[in-house]
Amino acid sequence: MEQAHHCTWGGGAWSSGWNRGTGGAVAQYDLGQAASFPSVKTSCLCLFPTDAWTSRWVESKHKSDYGKFKLTAGKFYGDAEKDKGLQTSQDARFYALSARFDSFSNKDKTLVVQFTVKHEQNIDCGGGYVKLFPSGLNQEDMHGDSEYNIMFGPDICGPGTKKVHVIFNYKGKNVLINKDIRCKDDEFTHLYTLIVRPDNTYEVKIDNNKVESGSLEEDWDFLPPKKIKDPEAKKPEDWDDRAKIDDPEDTKPEDWDKPEHIPDPDAKKPEDWDEEMDGEWEPPVIQNPEYKGEWKPRQIDNPDYKGKWVHPEIDNPDYTPDPSLYSYDSFGVIGLDLWQVKSGTIFDNFLITDDEKFAEEFGNETWGATKDAEKKMKEQQDEEQRKKQEEEDKKRKEEEGDDEPEGDDNEEEEEEDDDDEPEKEEEEETGGPLKDEL
């Protein structure tokens, strides 16, 4: 029998269906459920991977060799059941998996997208992001060029790329954020949250801590610039923008010009130098200690300096503000469309809501409730592995010691016999053992 995970909201536990708390009503959806609730204060869609996940998630058939997902909590976890998620299982593969939900628009509403990512394989190159698609997506034909609304989440490839993608589709063009948001690159589960507000502002959180925020218009190139350089303006011909000039009163000293290199005065022609054979002898050259380099007049303040000329700007006739940059008419599918060199990433705790506070509490009660136990289990595993490795190393060294050839002992005995030979020779010469002199 399928069992859904539980969360709390407003002090009440909720599993399947509804529970009204202090912040409104919420619904949980496992991968086999769906509902819409336009009349309630708080709207939320929660996707928890369960044993029935294949009934909700659709694998694209656009290619025949997409990588497979499996349901697992991984090698280490905080809770064996609650931490189960969708894990990539095949190396060097593209993945294309998606789940549909009732279509909605975020017009005049805050949009919060949240999920957890765990790169327990210590990922070297691969994506850990999600895509939100419009409801018109053909899931069985989803691929890398399928049009999406928002792409959000971590992306790692070598030491040079460790970023959080925040990409919006605007009028058919995918627009990347102009800021660099660094993602987590360890092996533990992390919570990623994107908040898009109807005032055209945004916020990115990792592990419920704000890491970036600002204005959609300022941090993405959705629109042409408000101002442009006046095409009619030109710098006046008599505009002097030189802060310093050569001093007209300064003159080069008469003894300034000296050669950079001179013949070595201490050099002497070798005695065996044959001019007929070796040619005319010339002394080697050395750096001239009196050489002063190229002479330049000293600099003085320019009395005609007018400052740096700034090209005047005018209002851009092509600029039109768009108060609905944040808004999309339709959200209907969440997808994992990514490439991974080394598989093992686990995705879990998918949440789409219009309530920032609820998203934060939801994160604390899912990711936050098991993260410490997960870390503890990993540390215990590492310690056990360390001890095991030490025992194996010790055993190997002992075996190597037992395998030493017996000839070594014989060689030592022969060396001792050799040391005794001089004493025997001295005894033979003196006719007996040596004695101390009186």
Image (cartoon, rainbow, N blue to C red):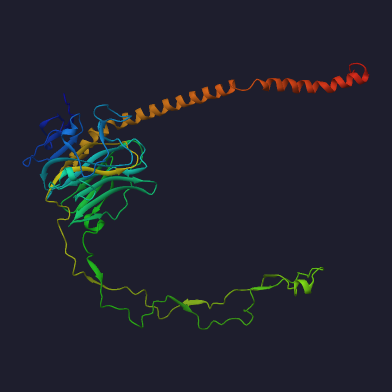
- The answer to whether residue 276 is left or right of residue 321 is right
- The answer to whether residue 215 is left or right of residue 18 is right
Judged from this view, the residue extending furthest toward the left is 39
- The answer to whether residue 308 is left or right of residue 251 is left
Q: Is residue 436 visible?
A: no
The residue at the point 22 percent across, 47 percent down is 143
Q: Nearer the viewer, residue 43 or 402?
A: 402
Image quarter in which the C terminus is found = top right
Would you place residue 102 above or below residue 14 in this image? Answer: below
Q: Nearer the viewer, residue 350 or 281?
A: 281
The residue at the point 57 percent across, 24 percent down is 400
Image quarter in which the N terminus is found = top left
Q: Where does the image place residue 173, in percent across and percent down from the top left? A: 21, 57
Q: Where does the image place residue 347, in percent across and percent down from the top left? A: 26, 37
Quarter-of-image position of residue 354? top left
Quarter-of-image position of residue 46? top left
Quarter-of-image position of residue 379? top left
Would you place residue 379 above or below residue 213 in this image? Answer: above
Q: Nearer the viewer, residue 390 or 272?
A: 272
Q: Where does the image place residue 166, in percent across and percent down from the top left? A: 25, 50
The residue at the point 50 percent across, 83 percent down is 248
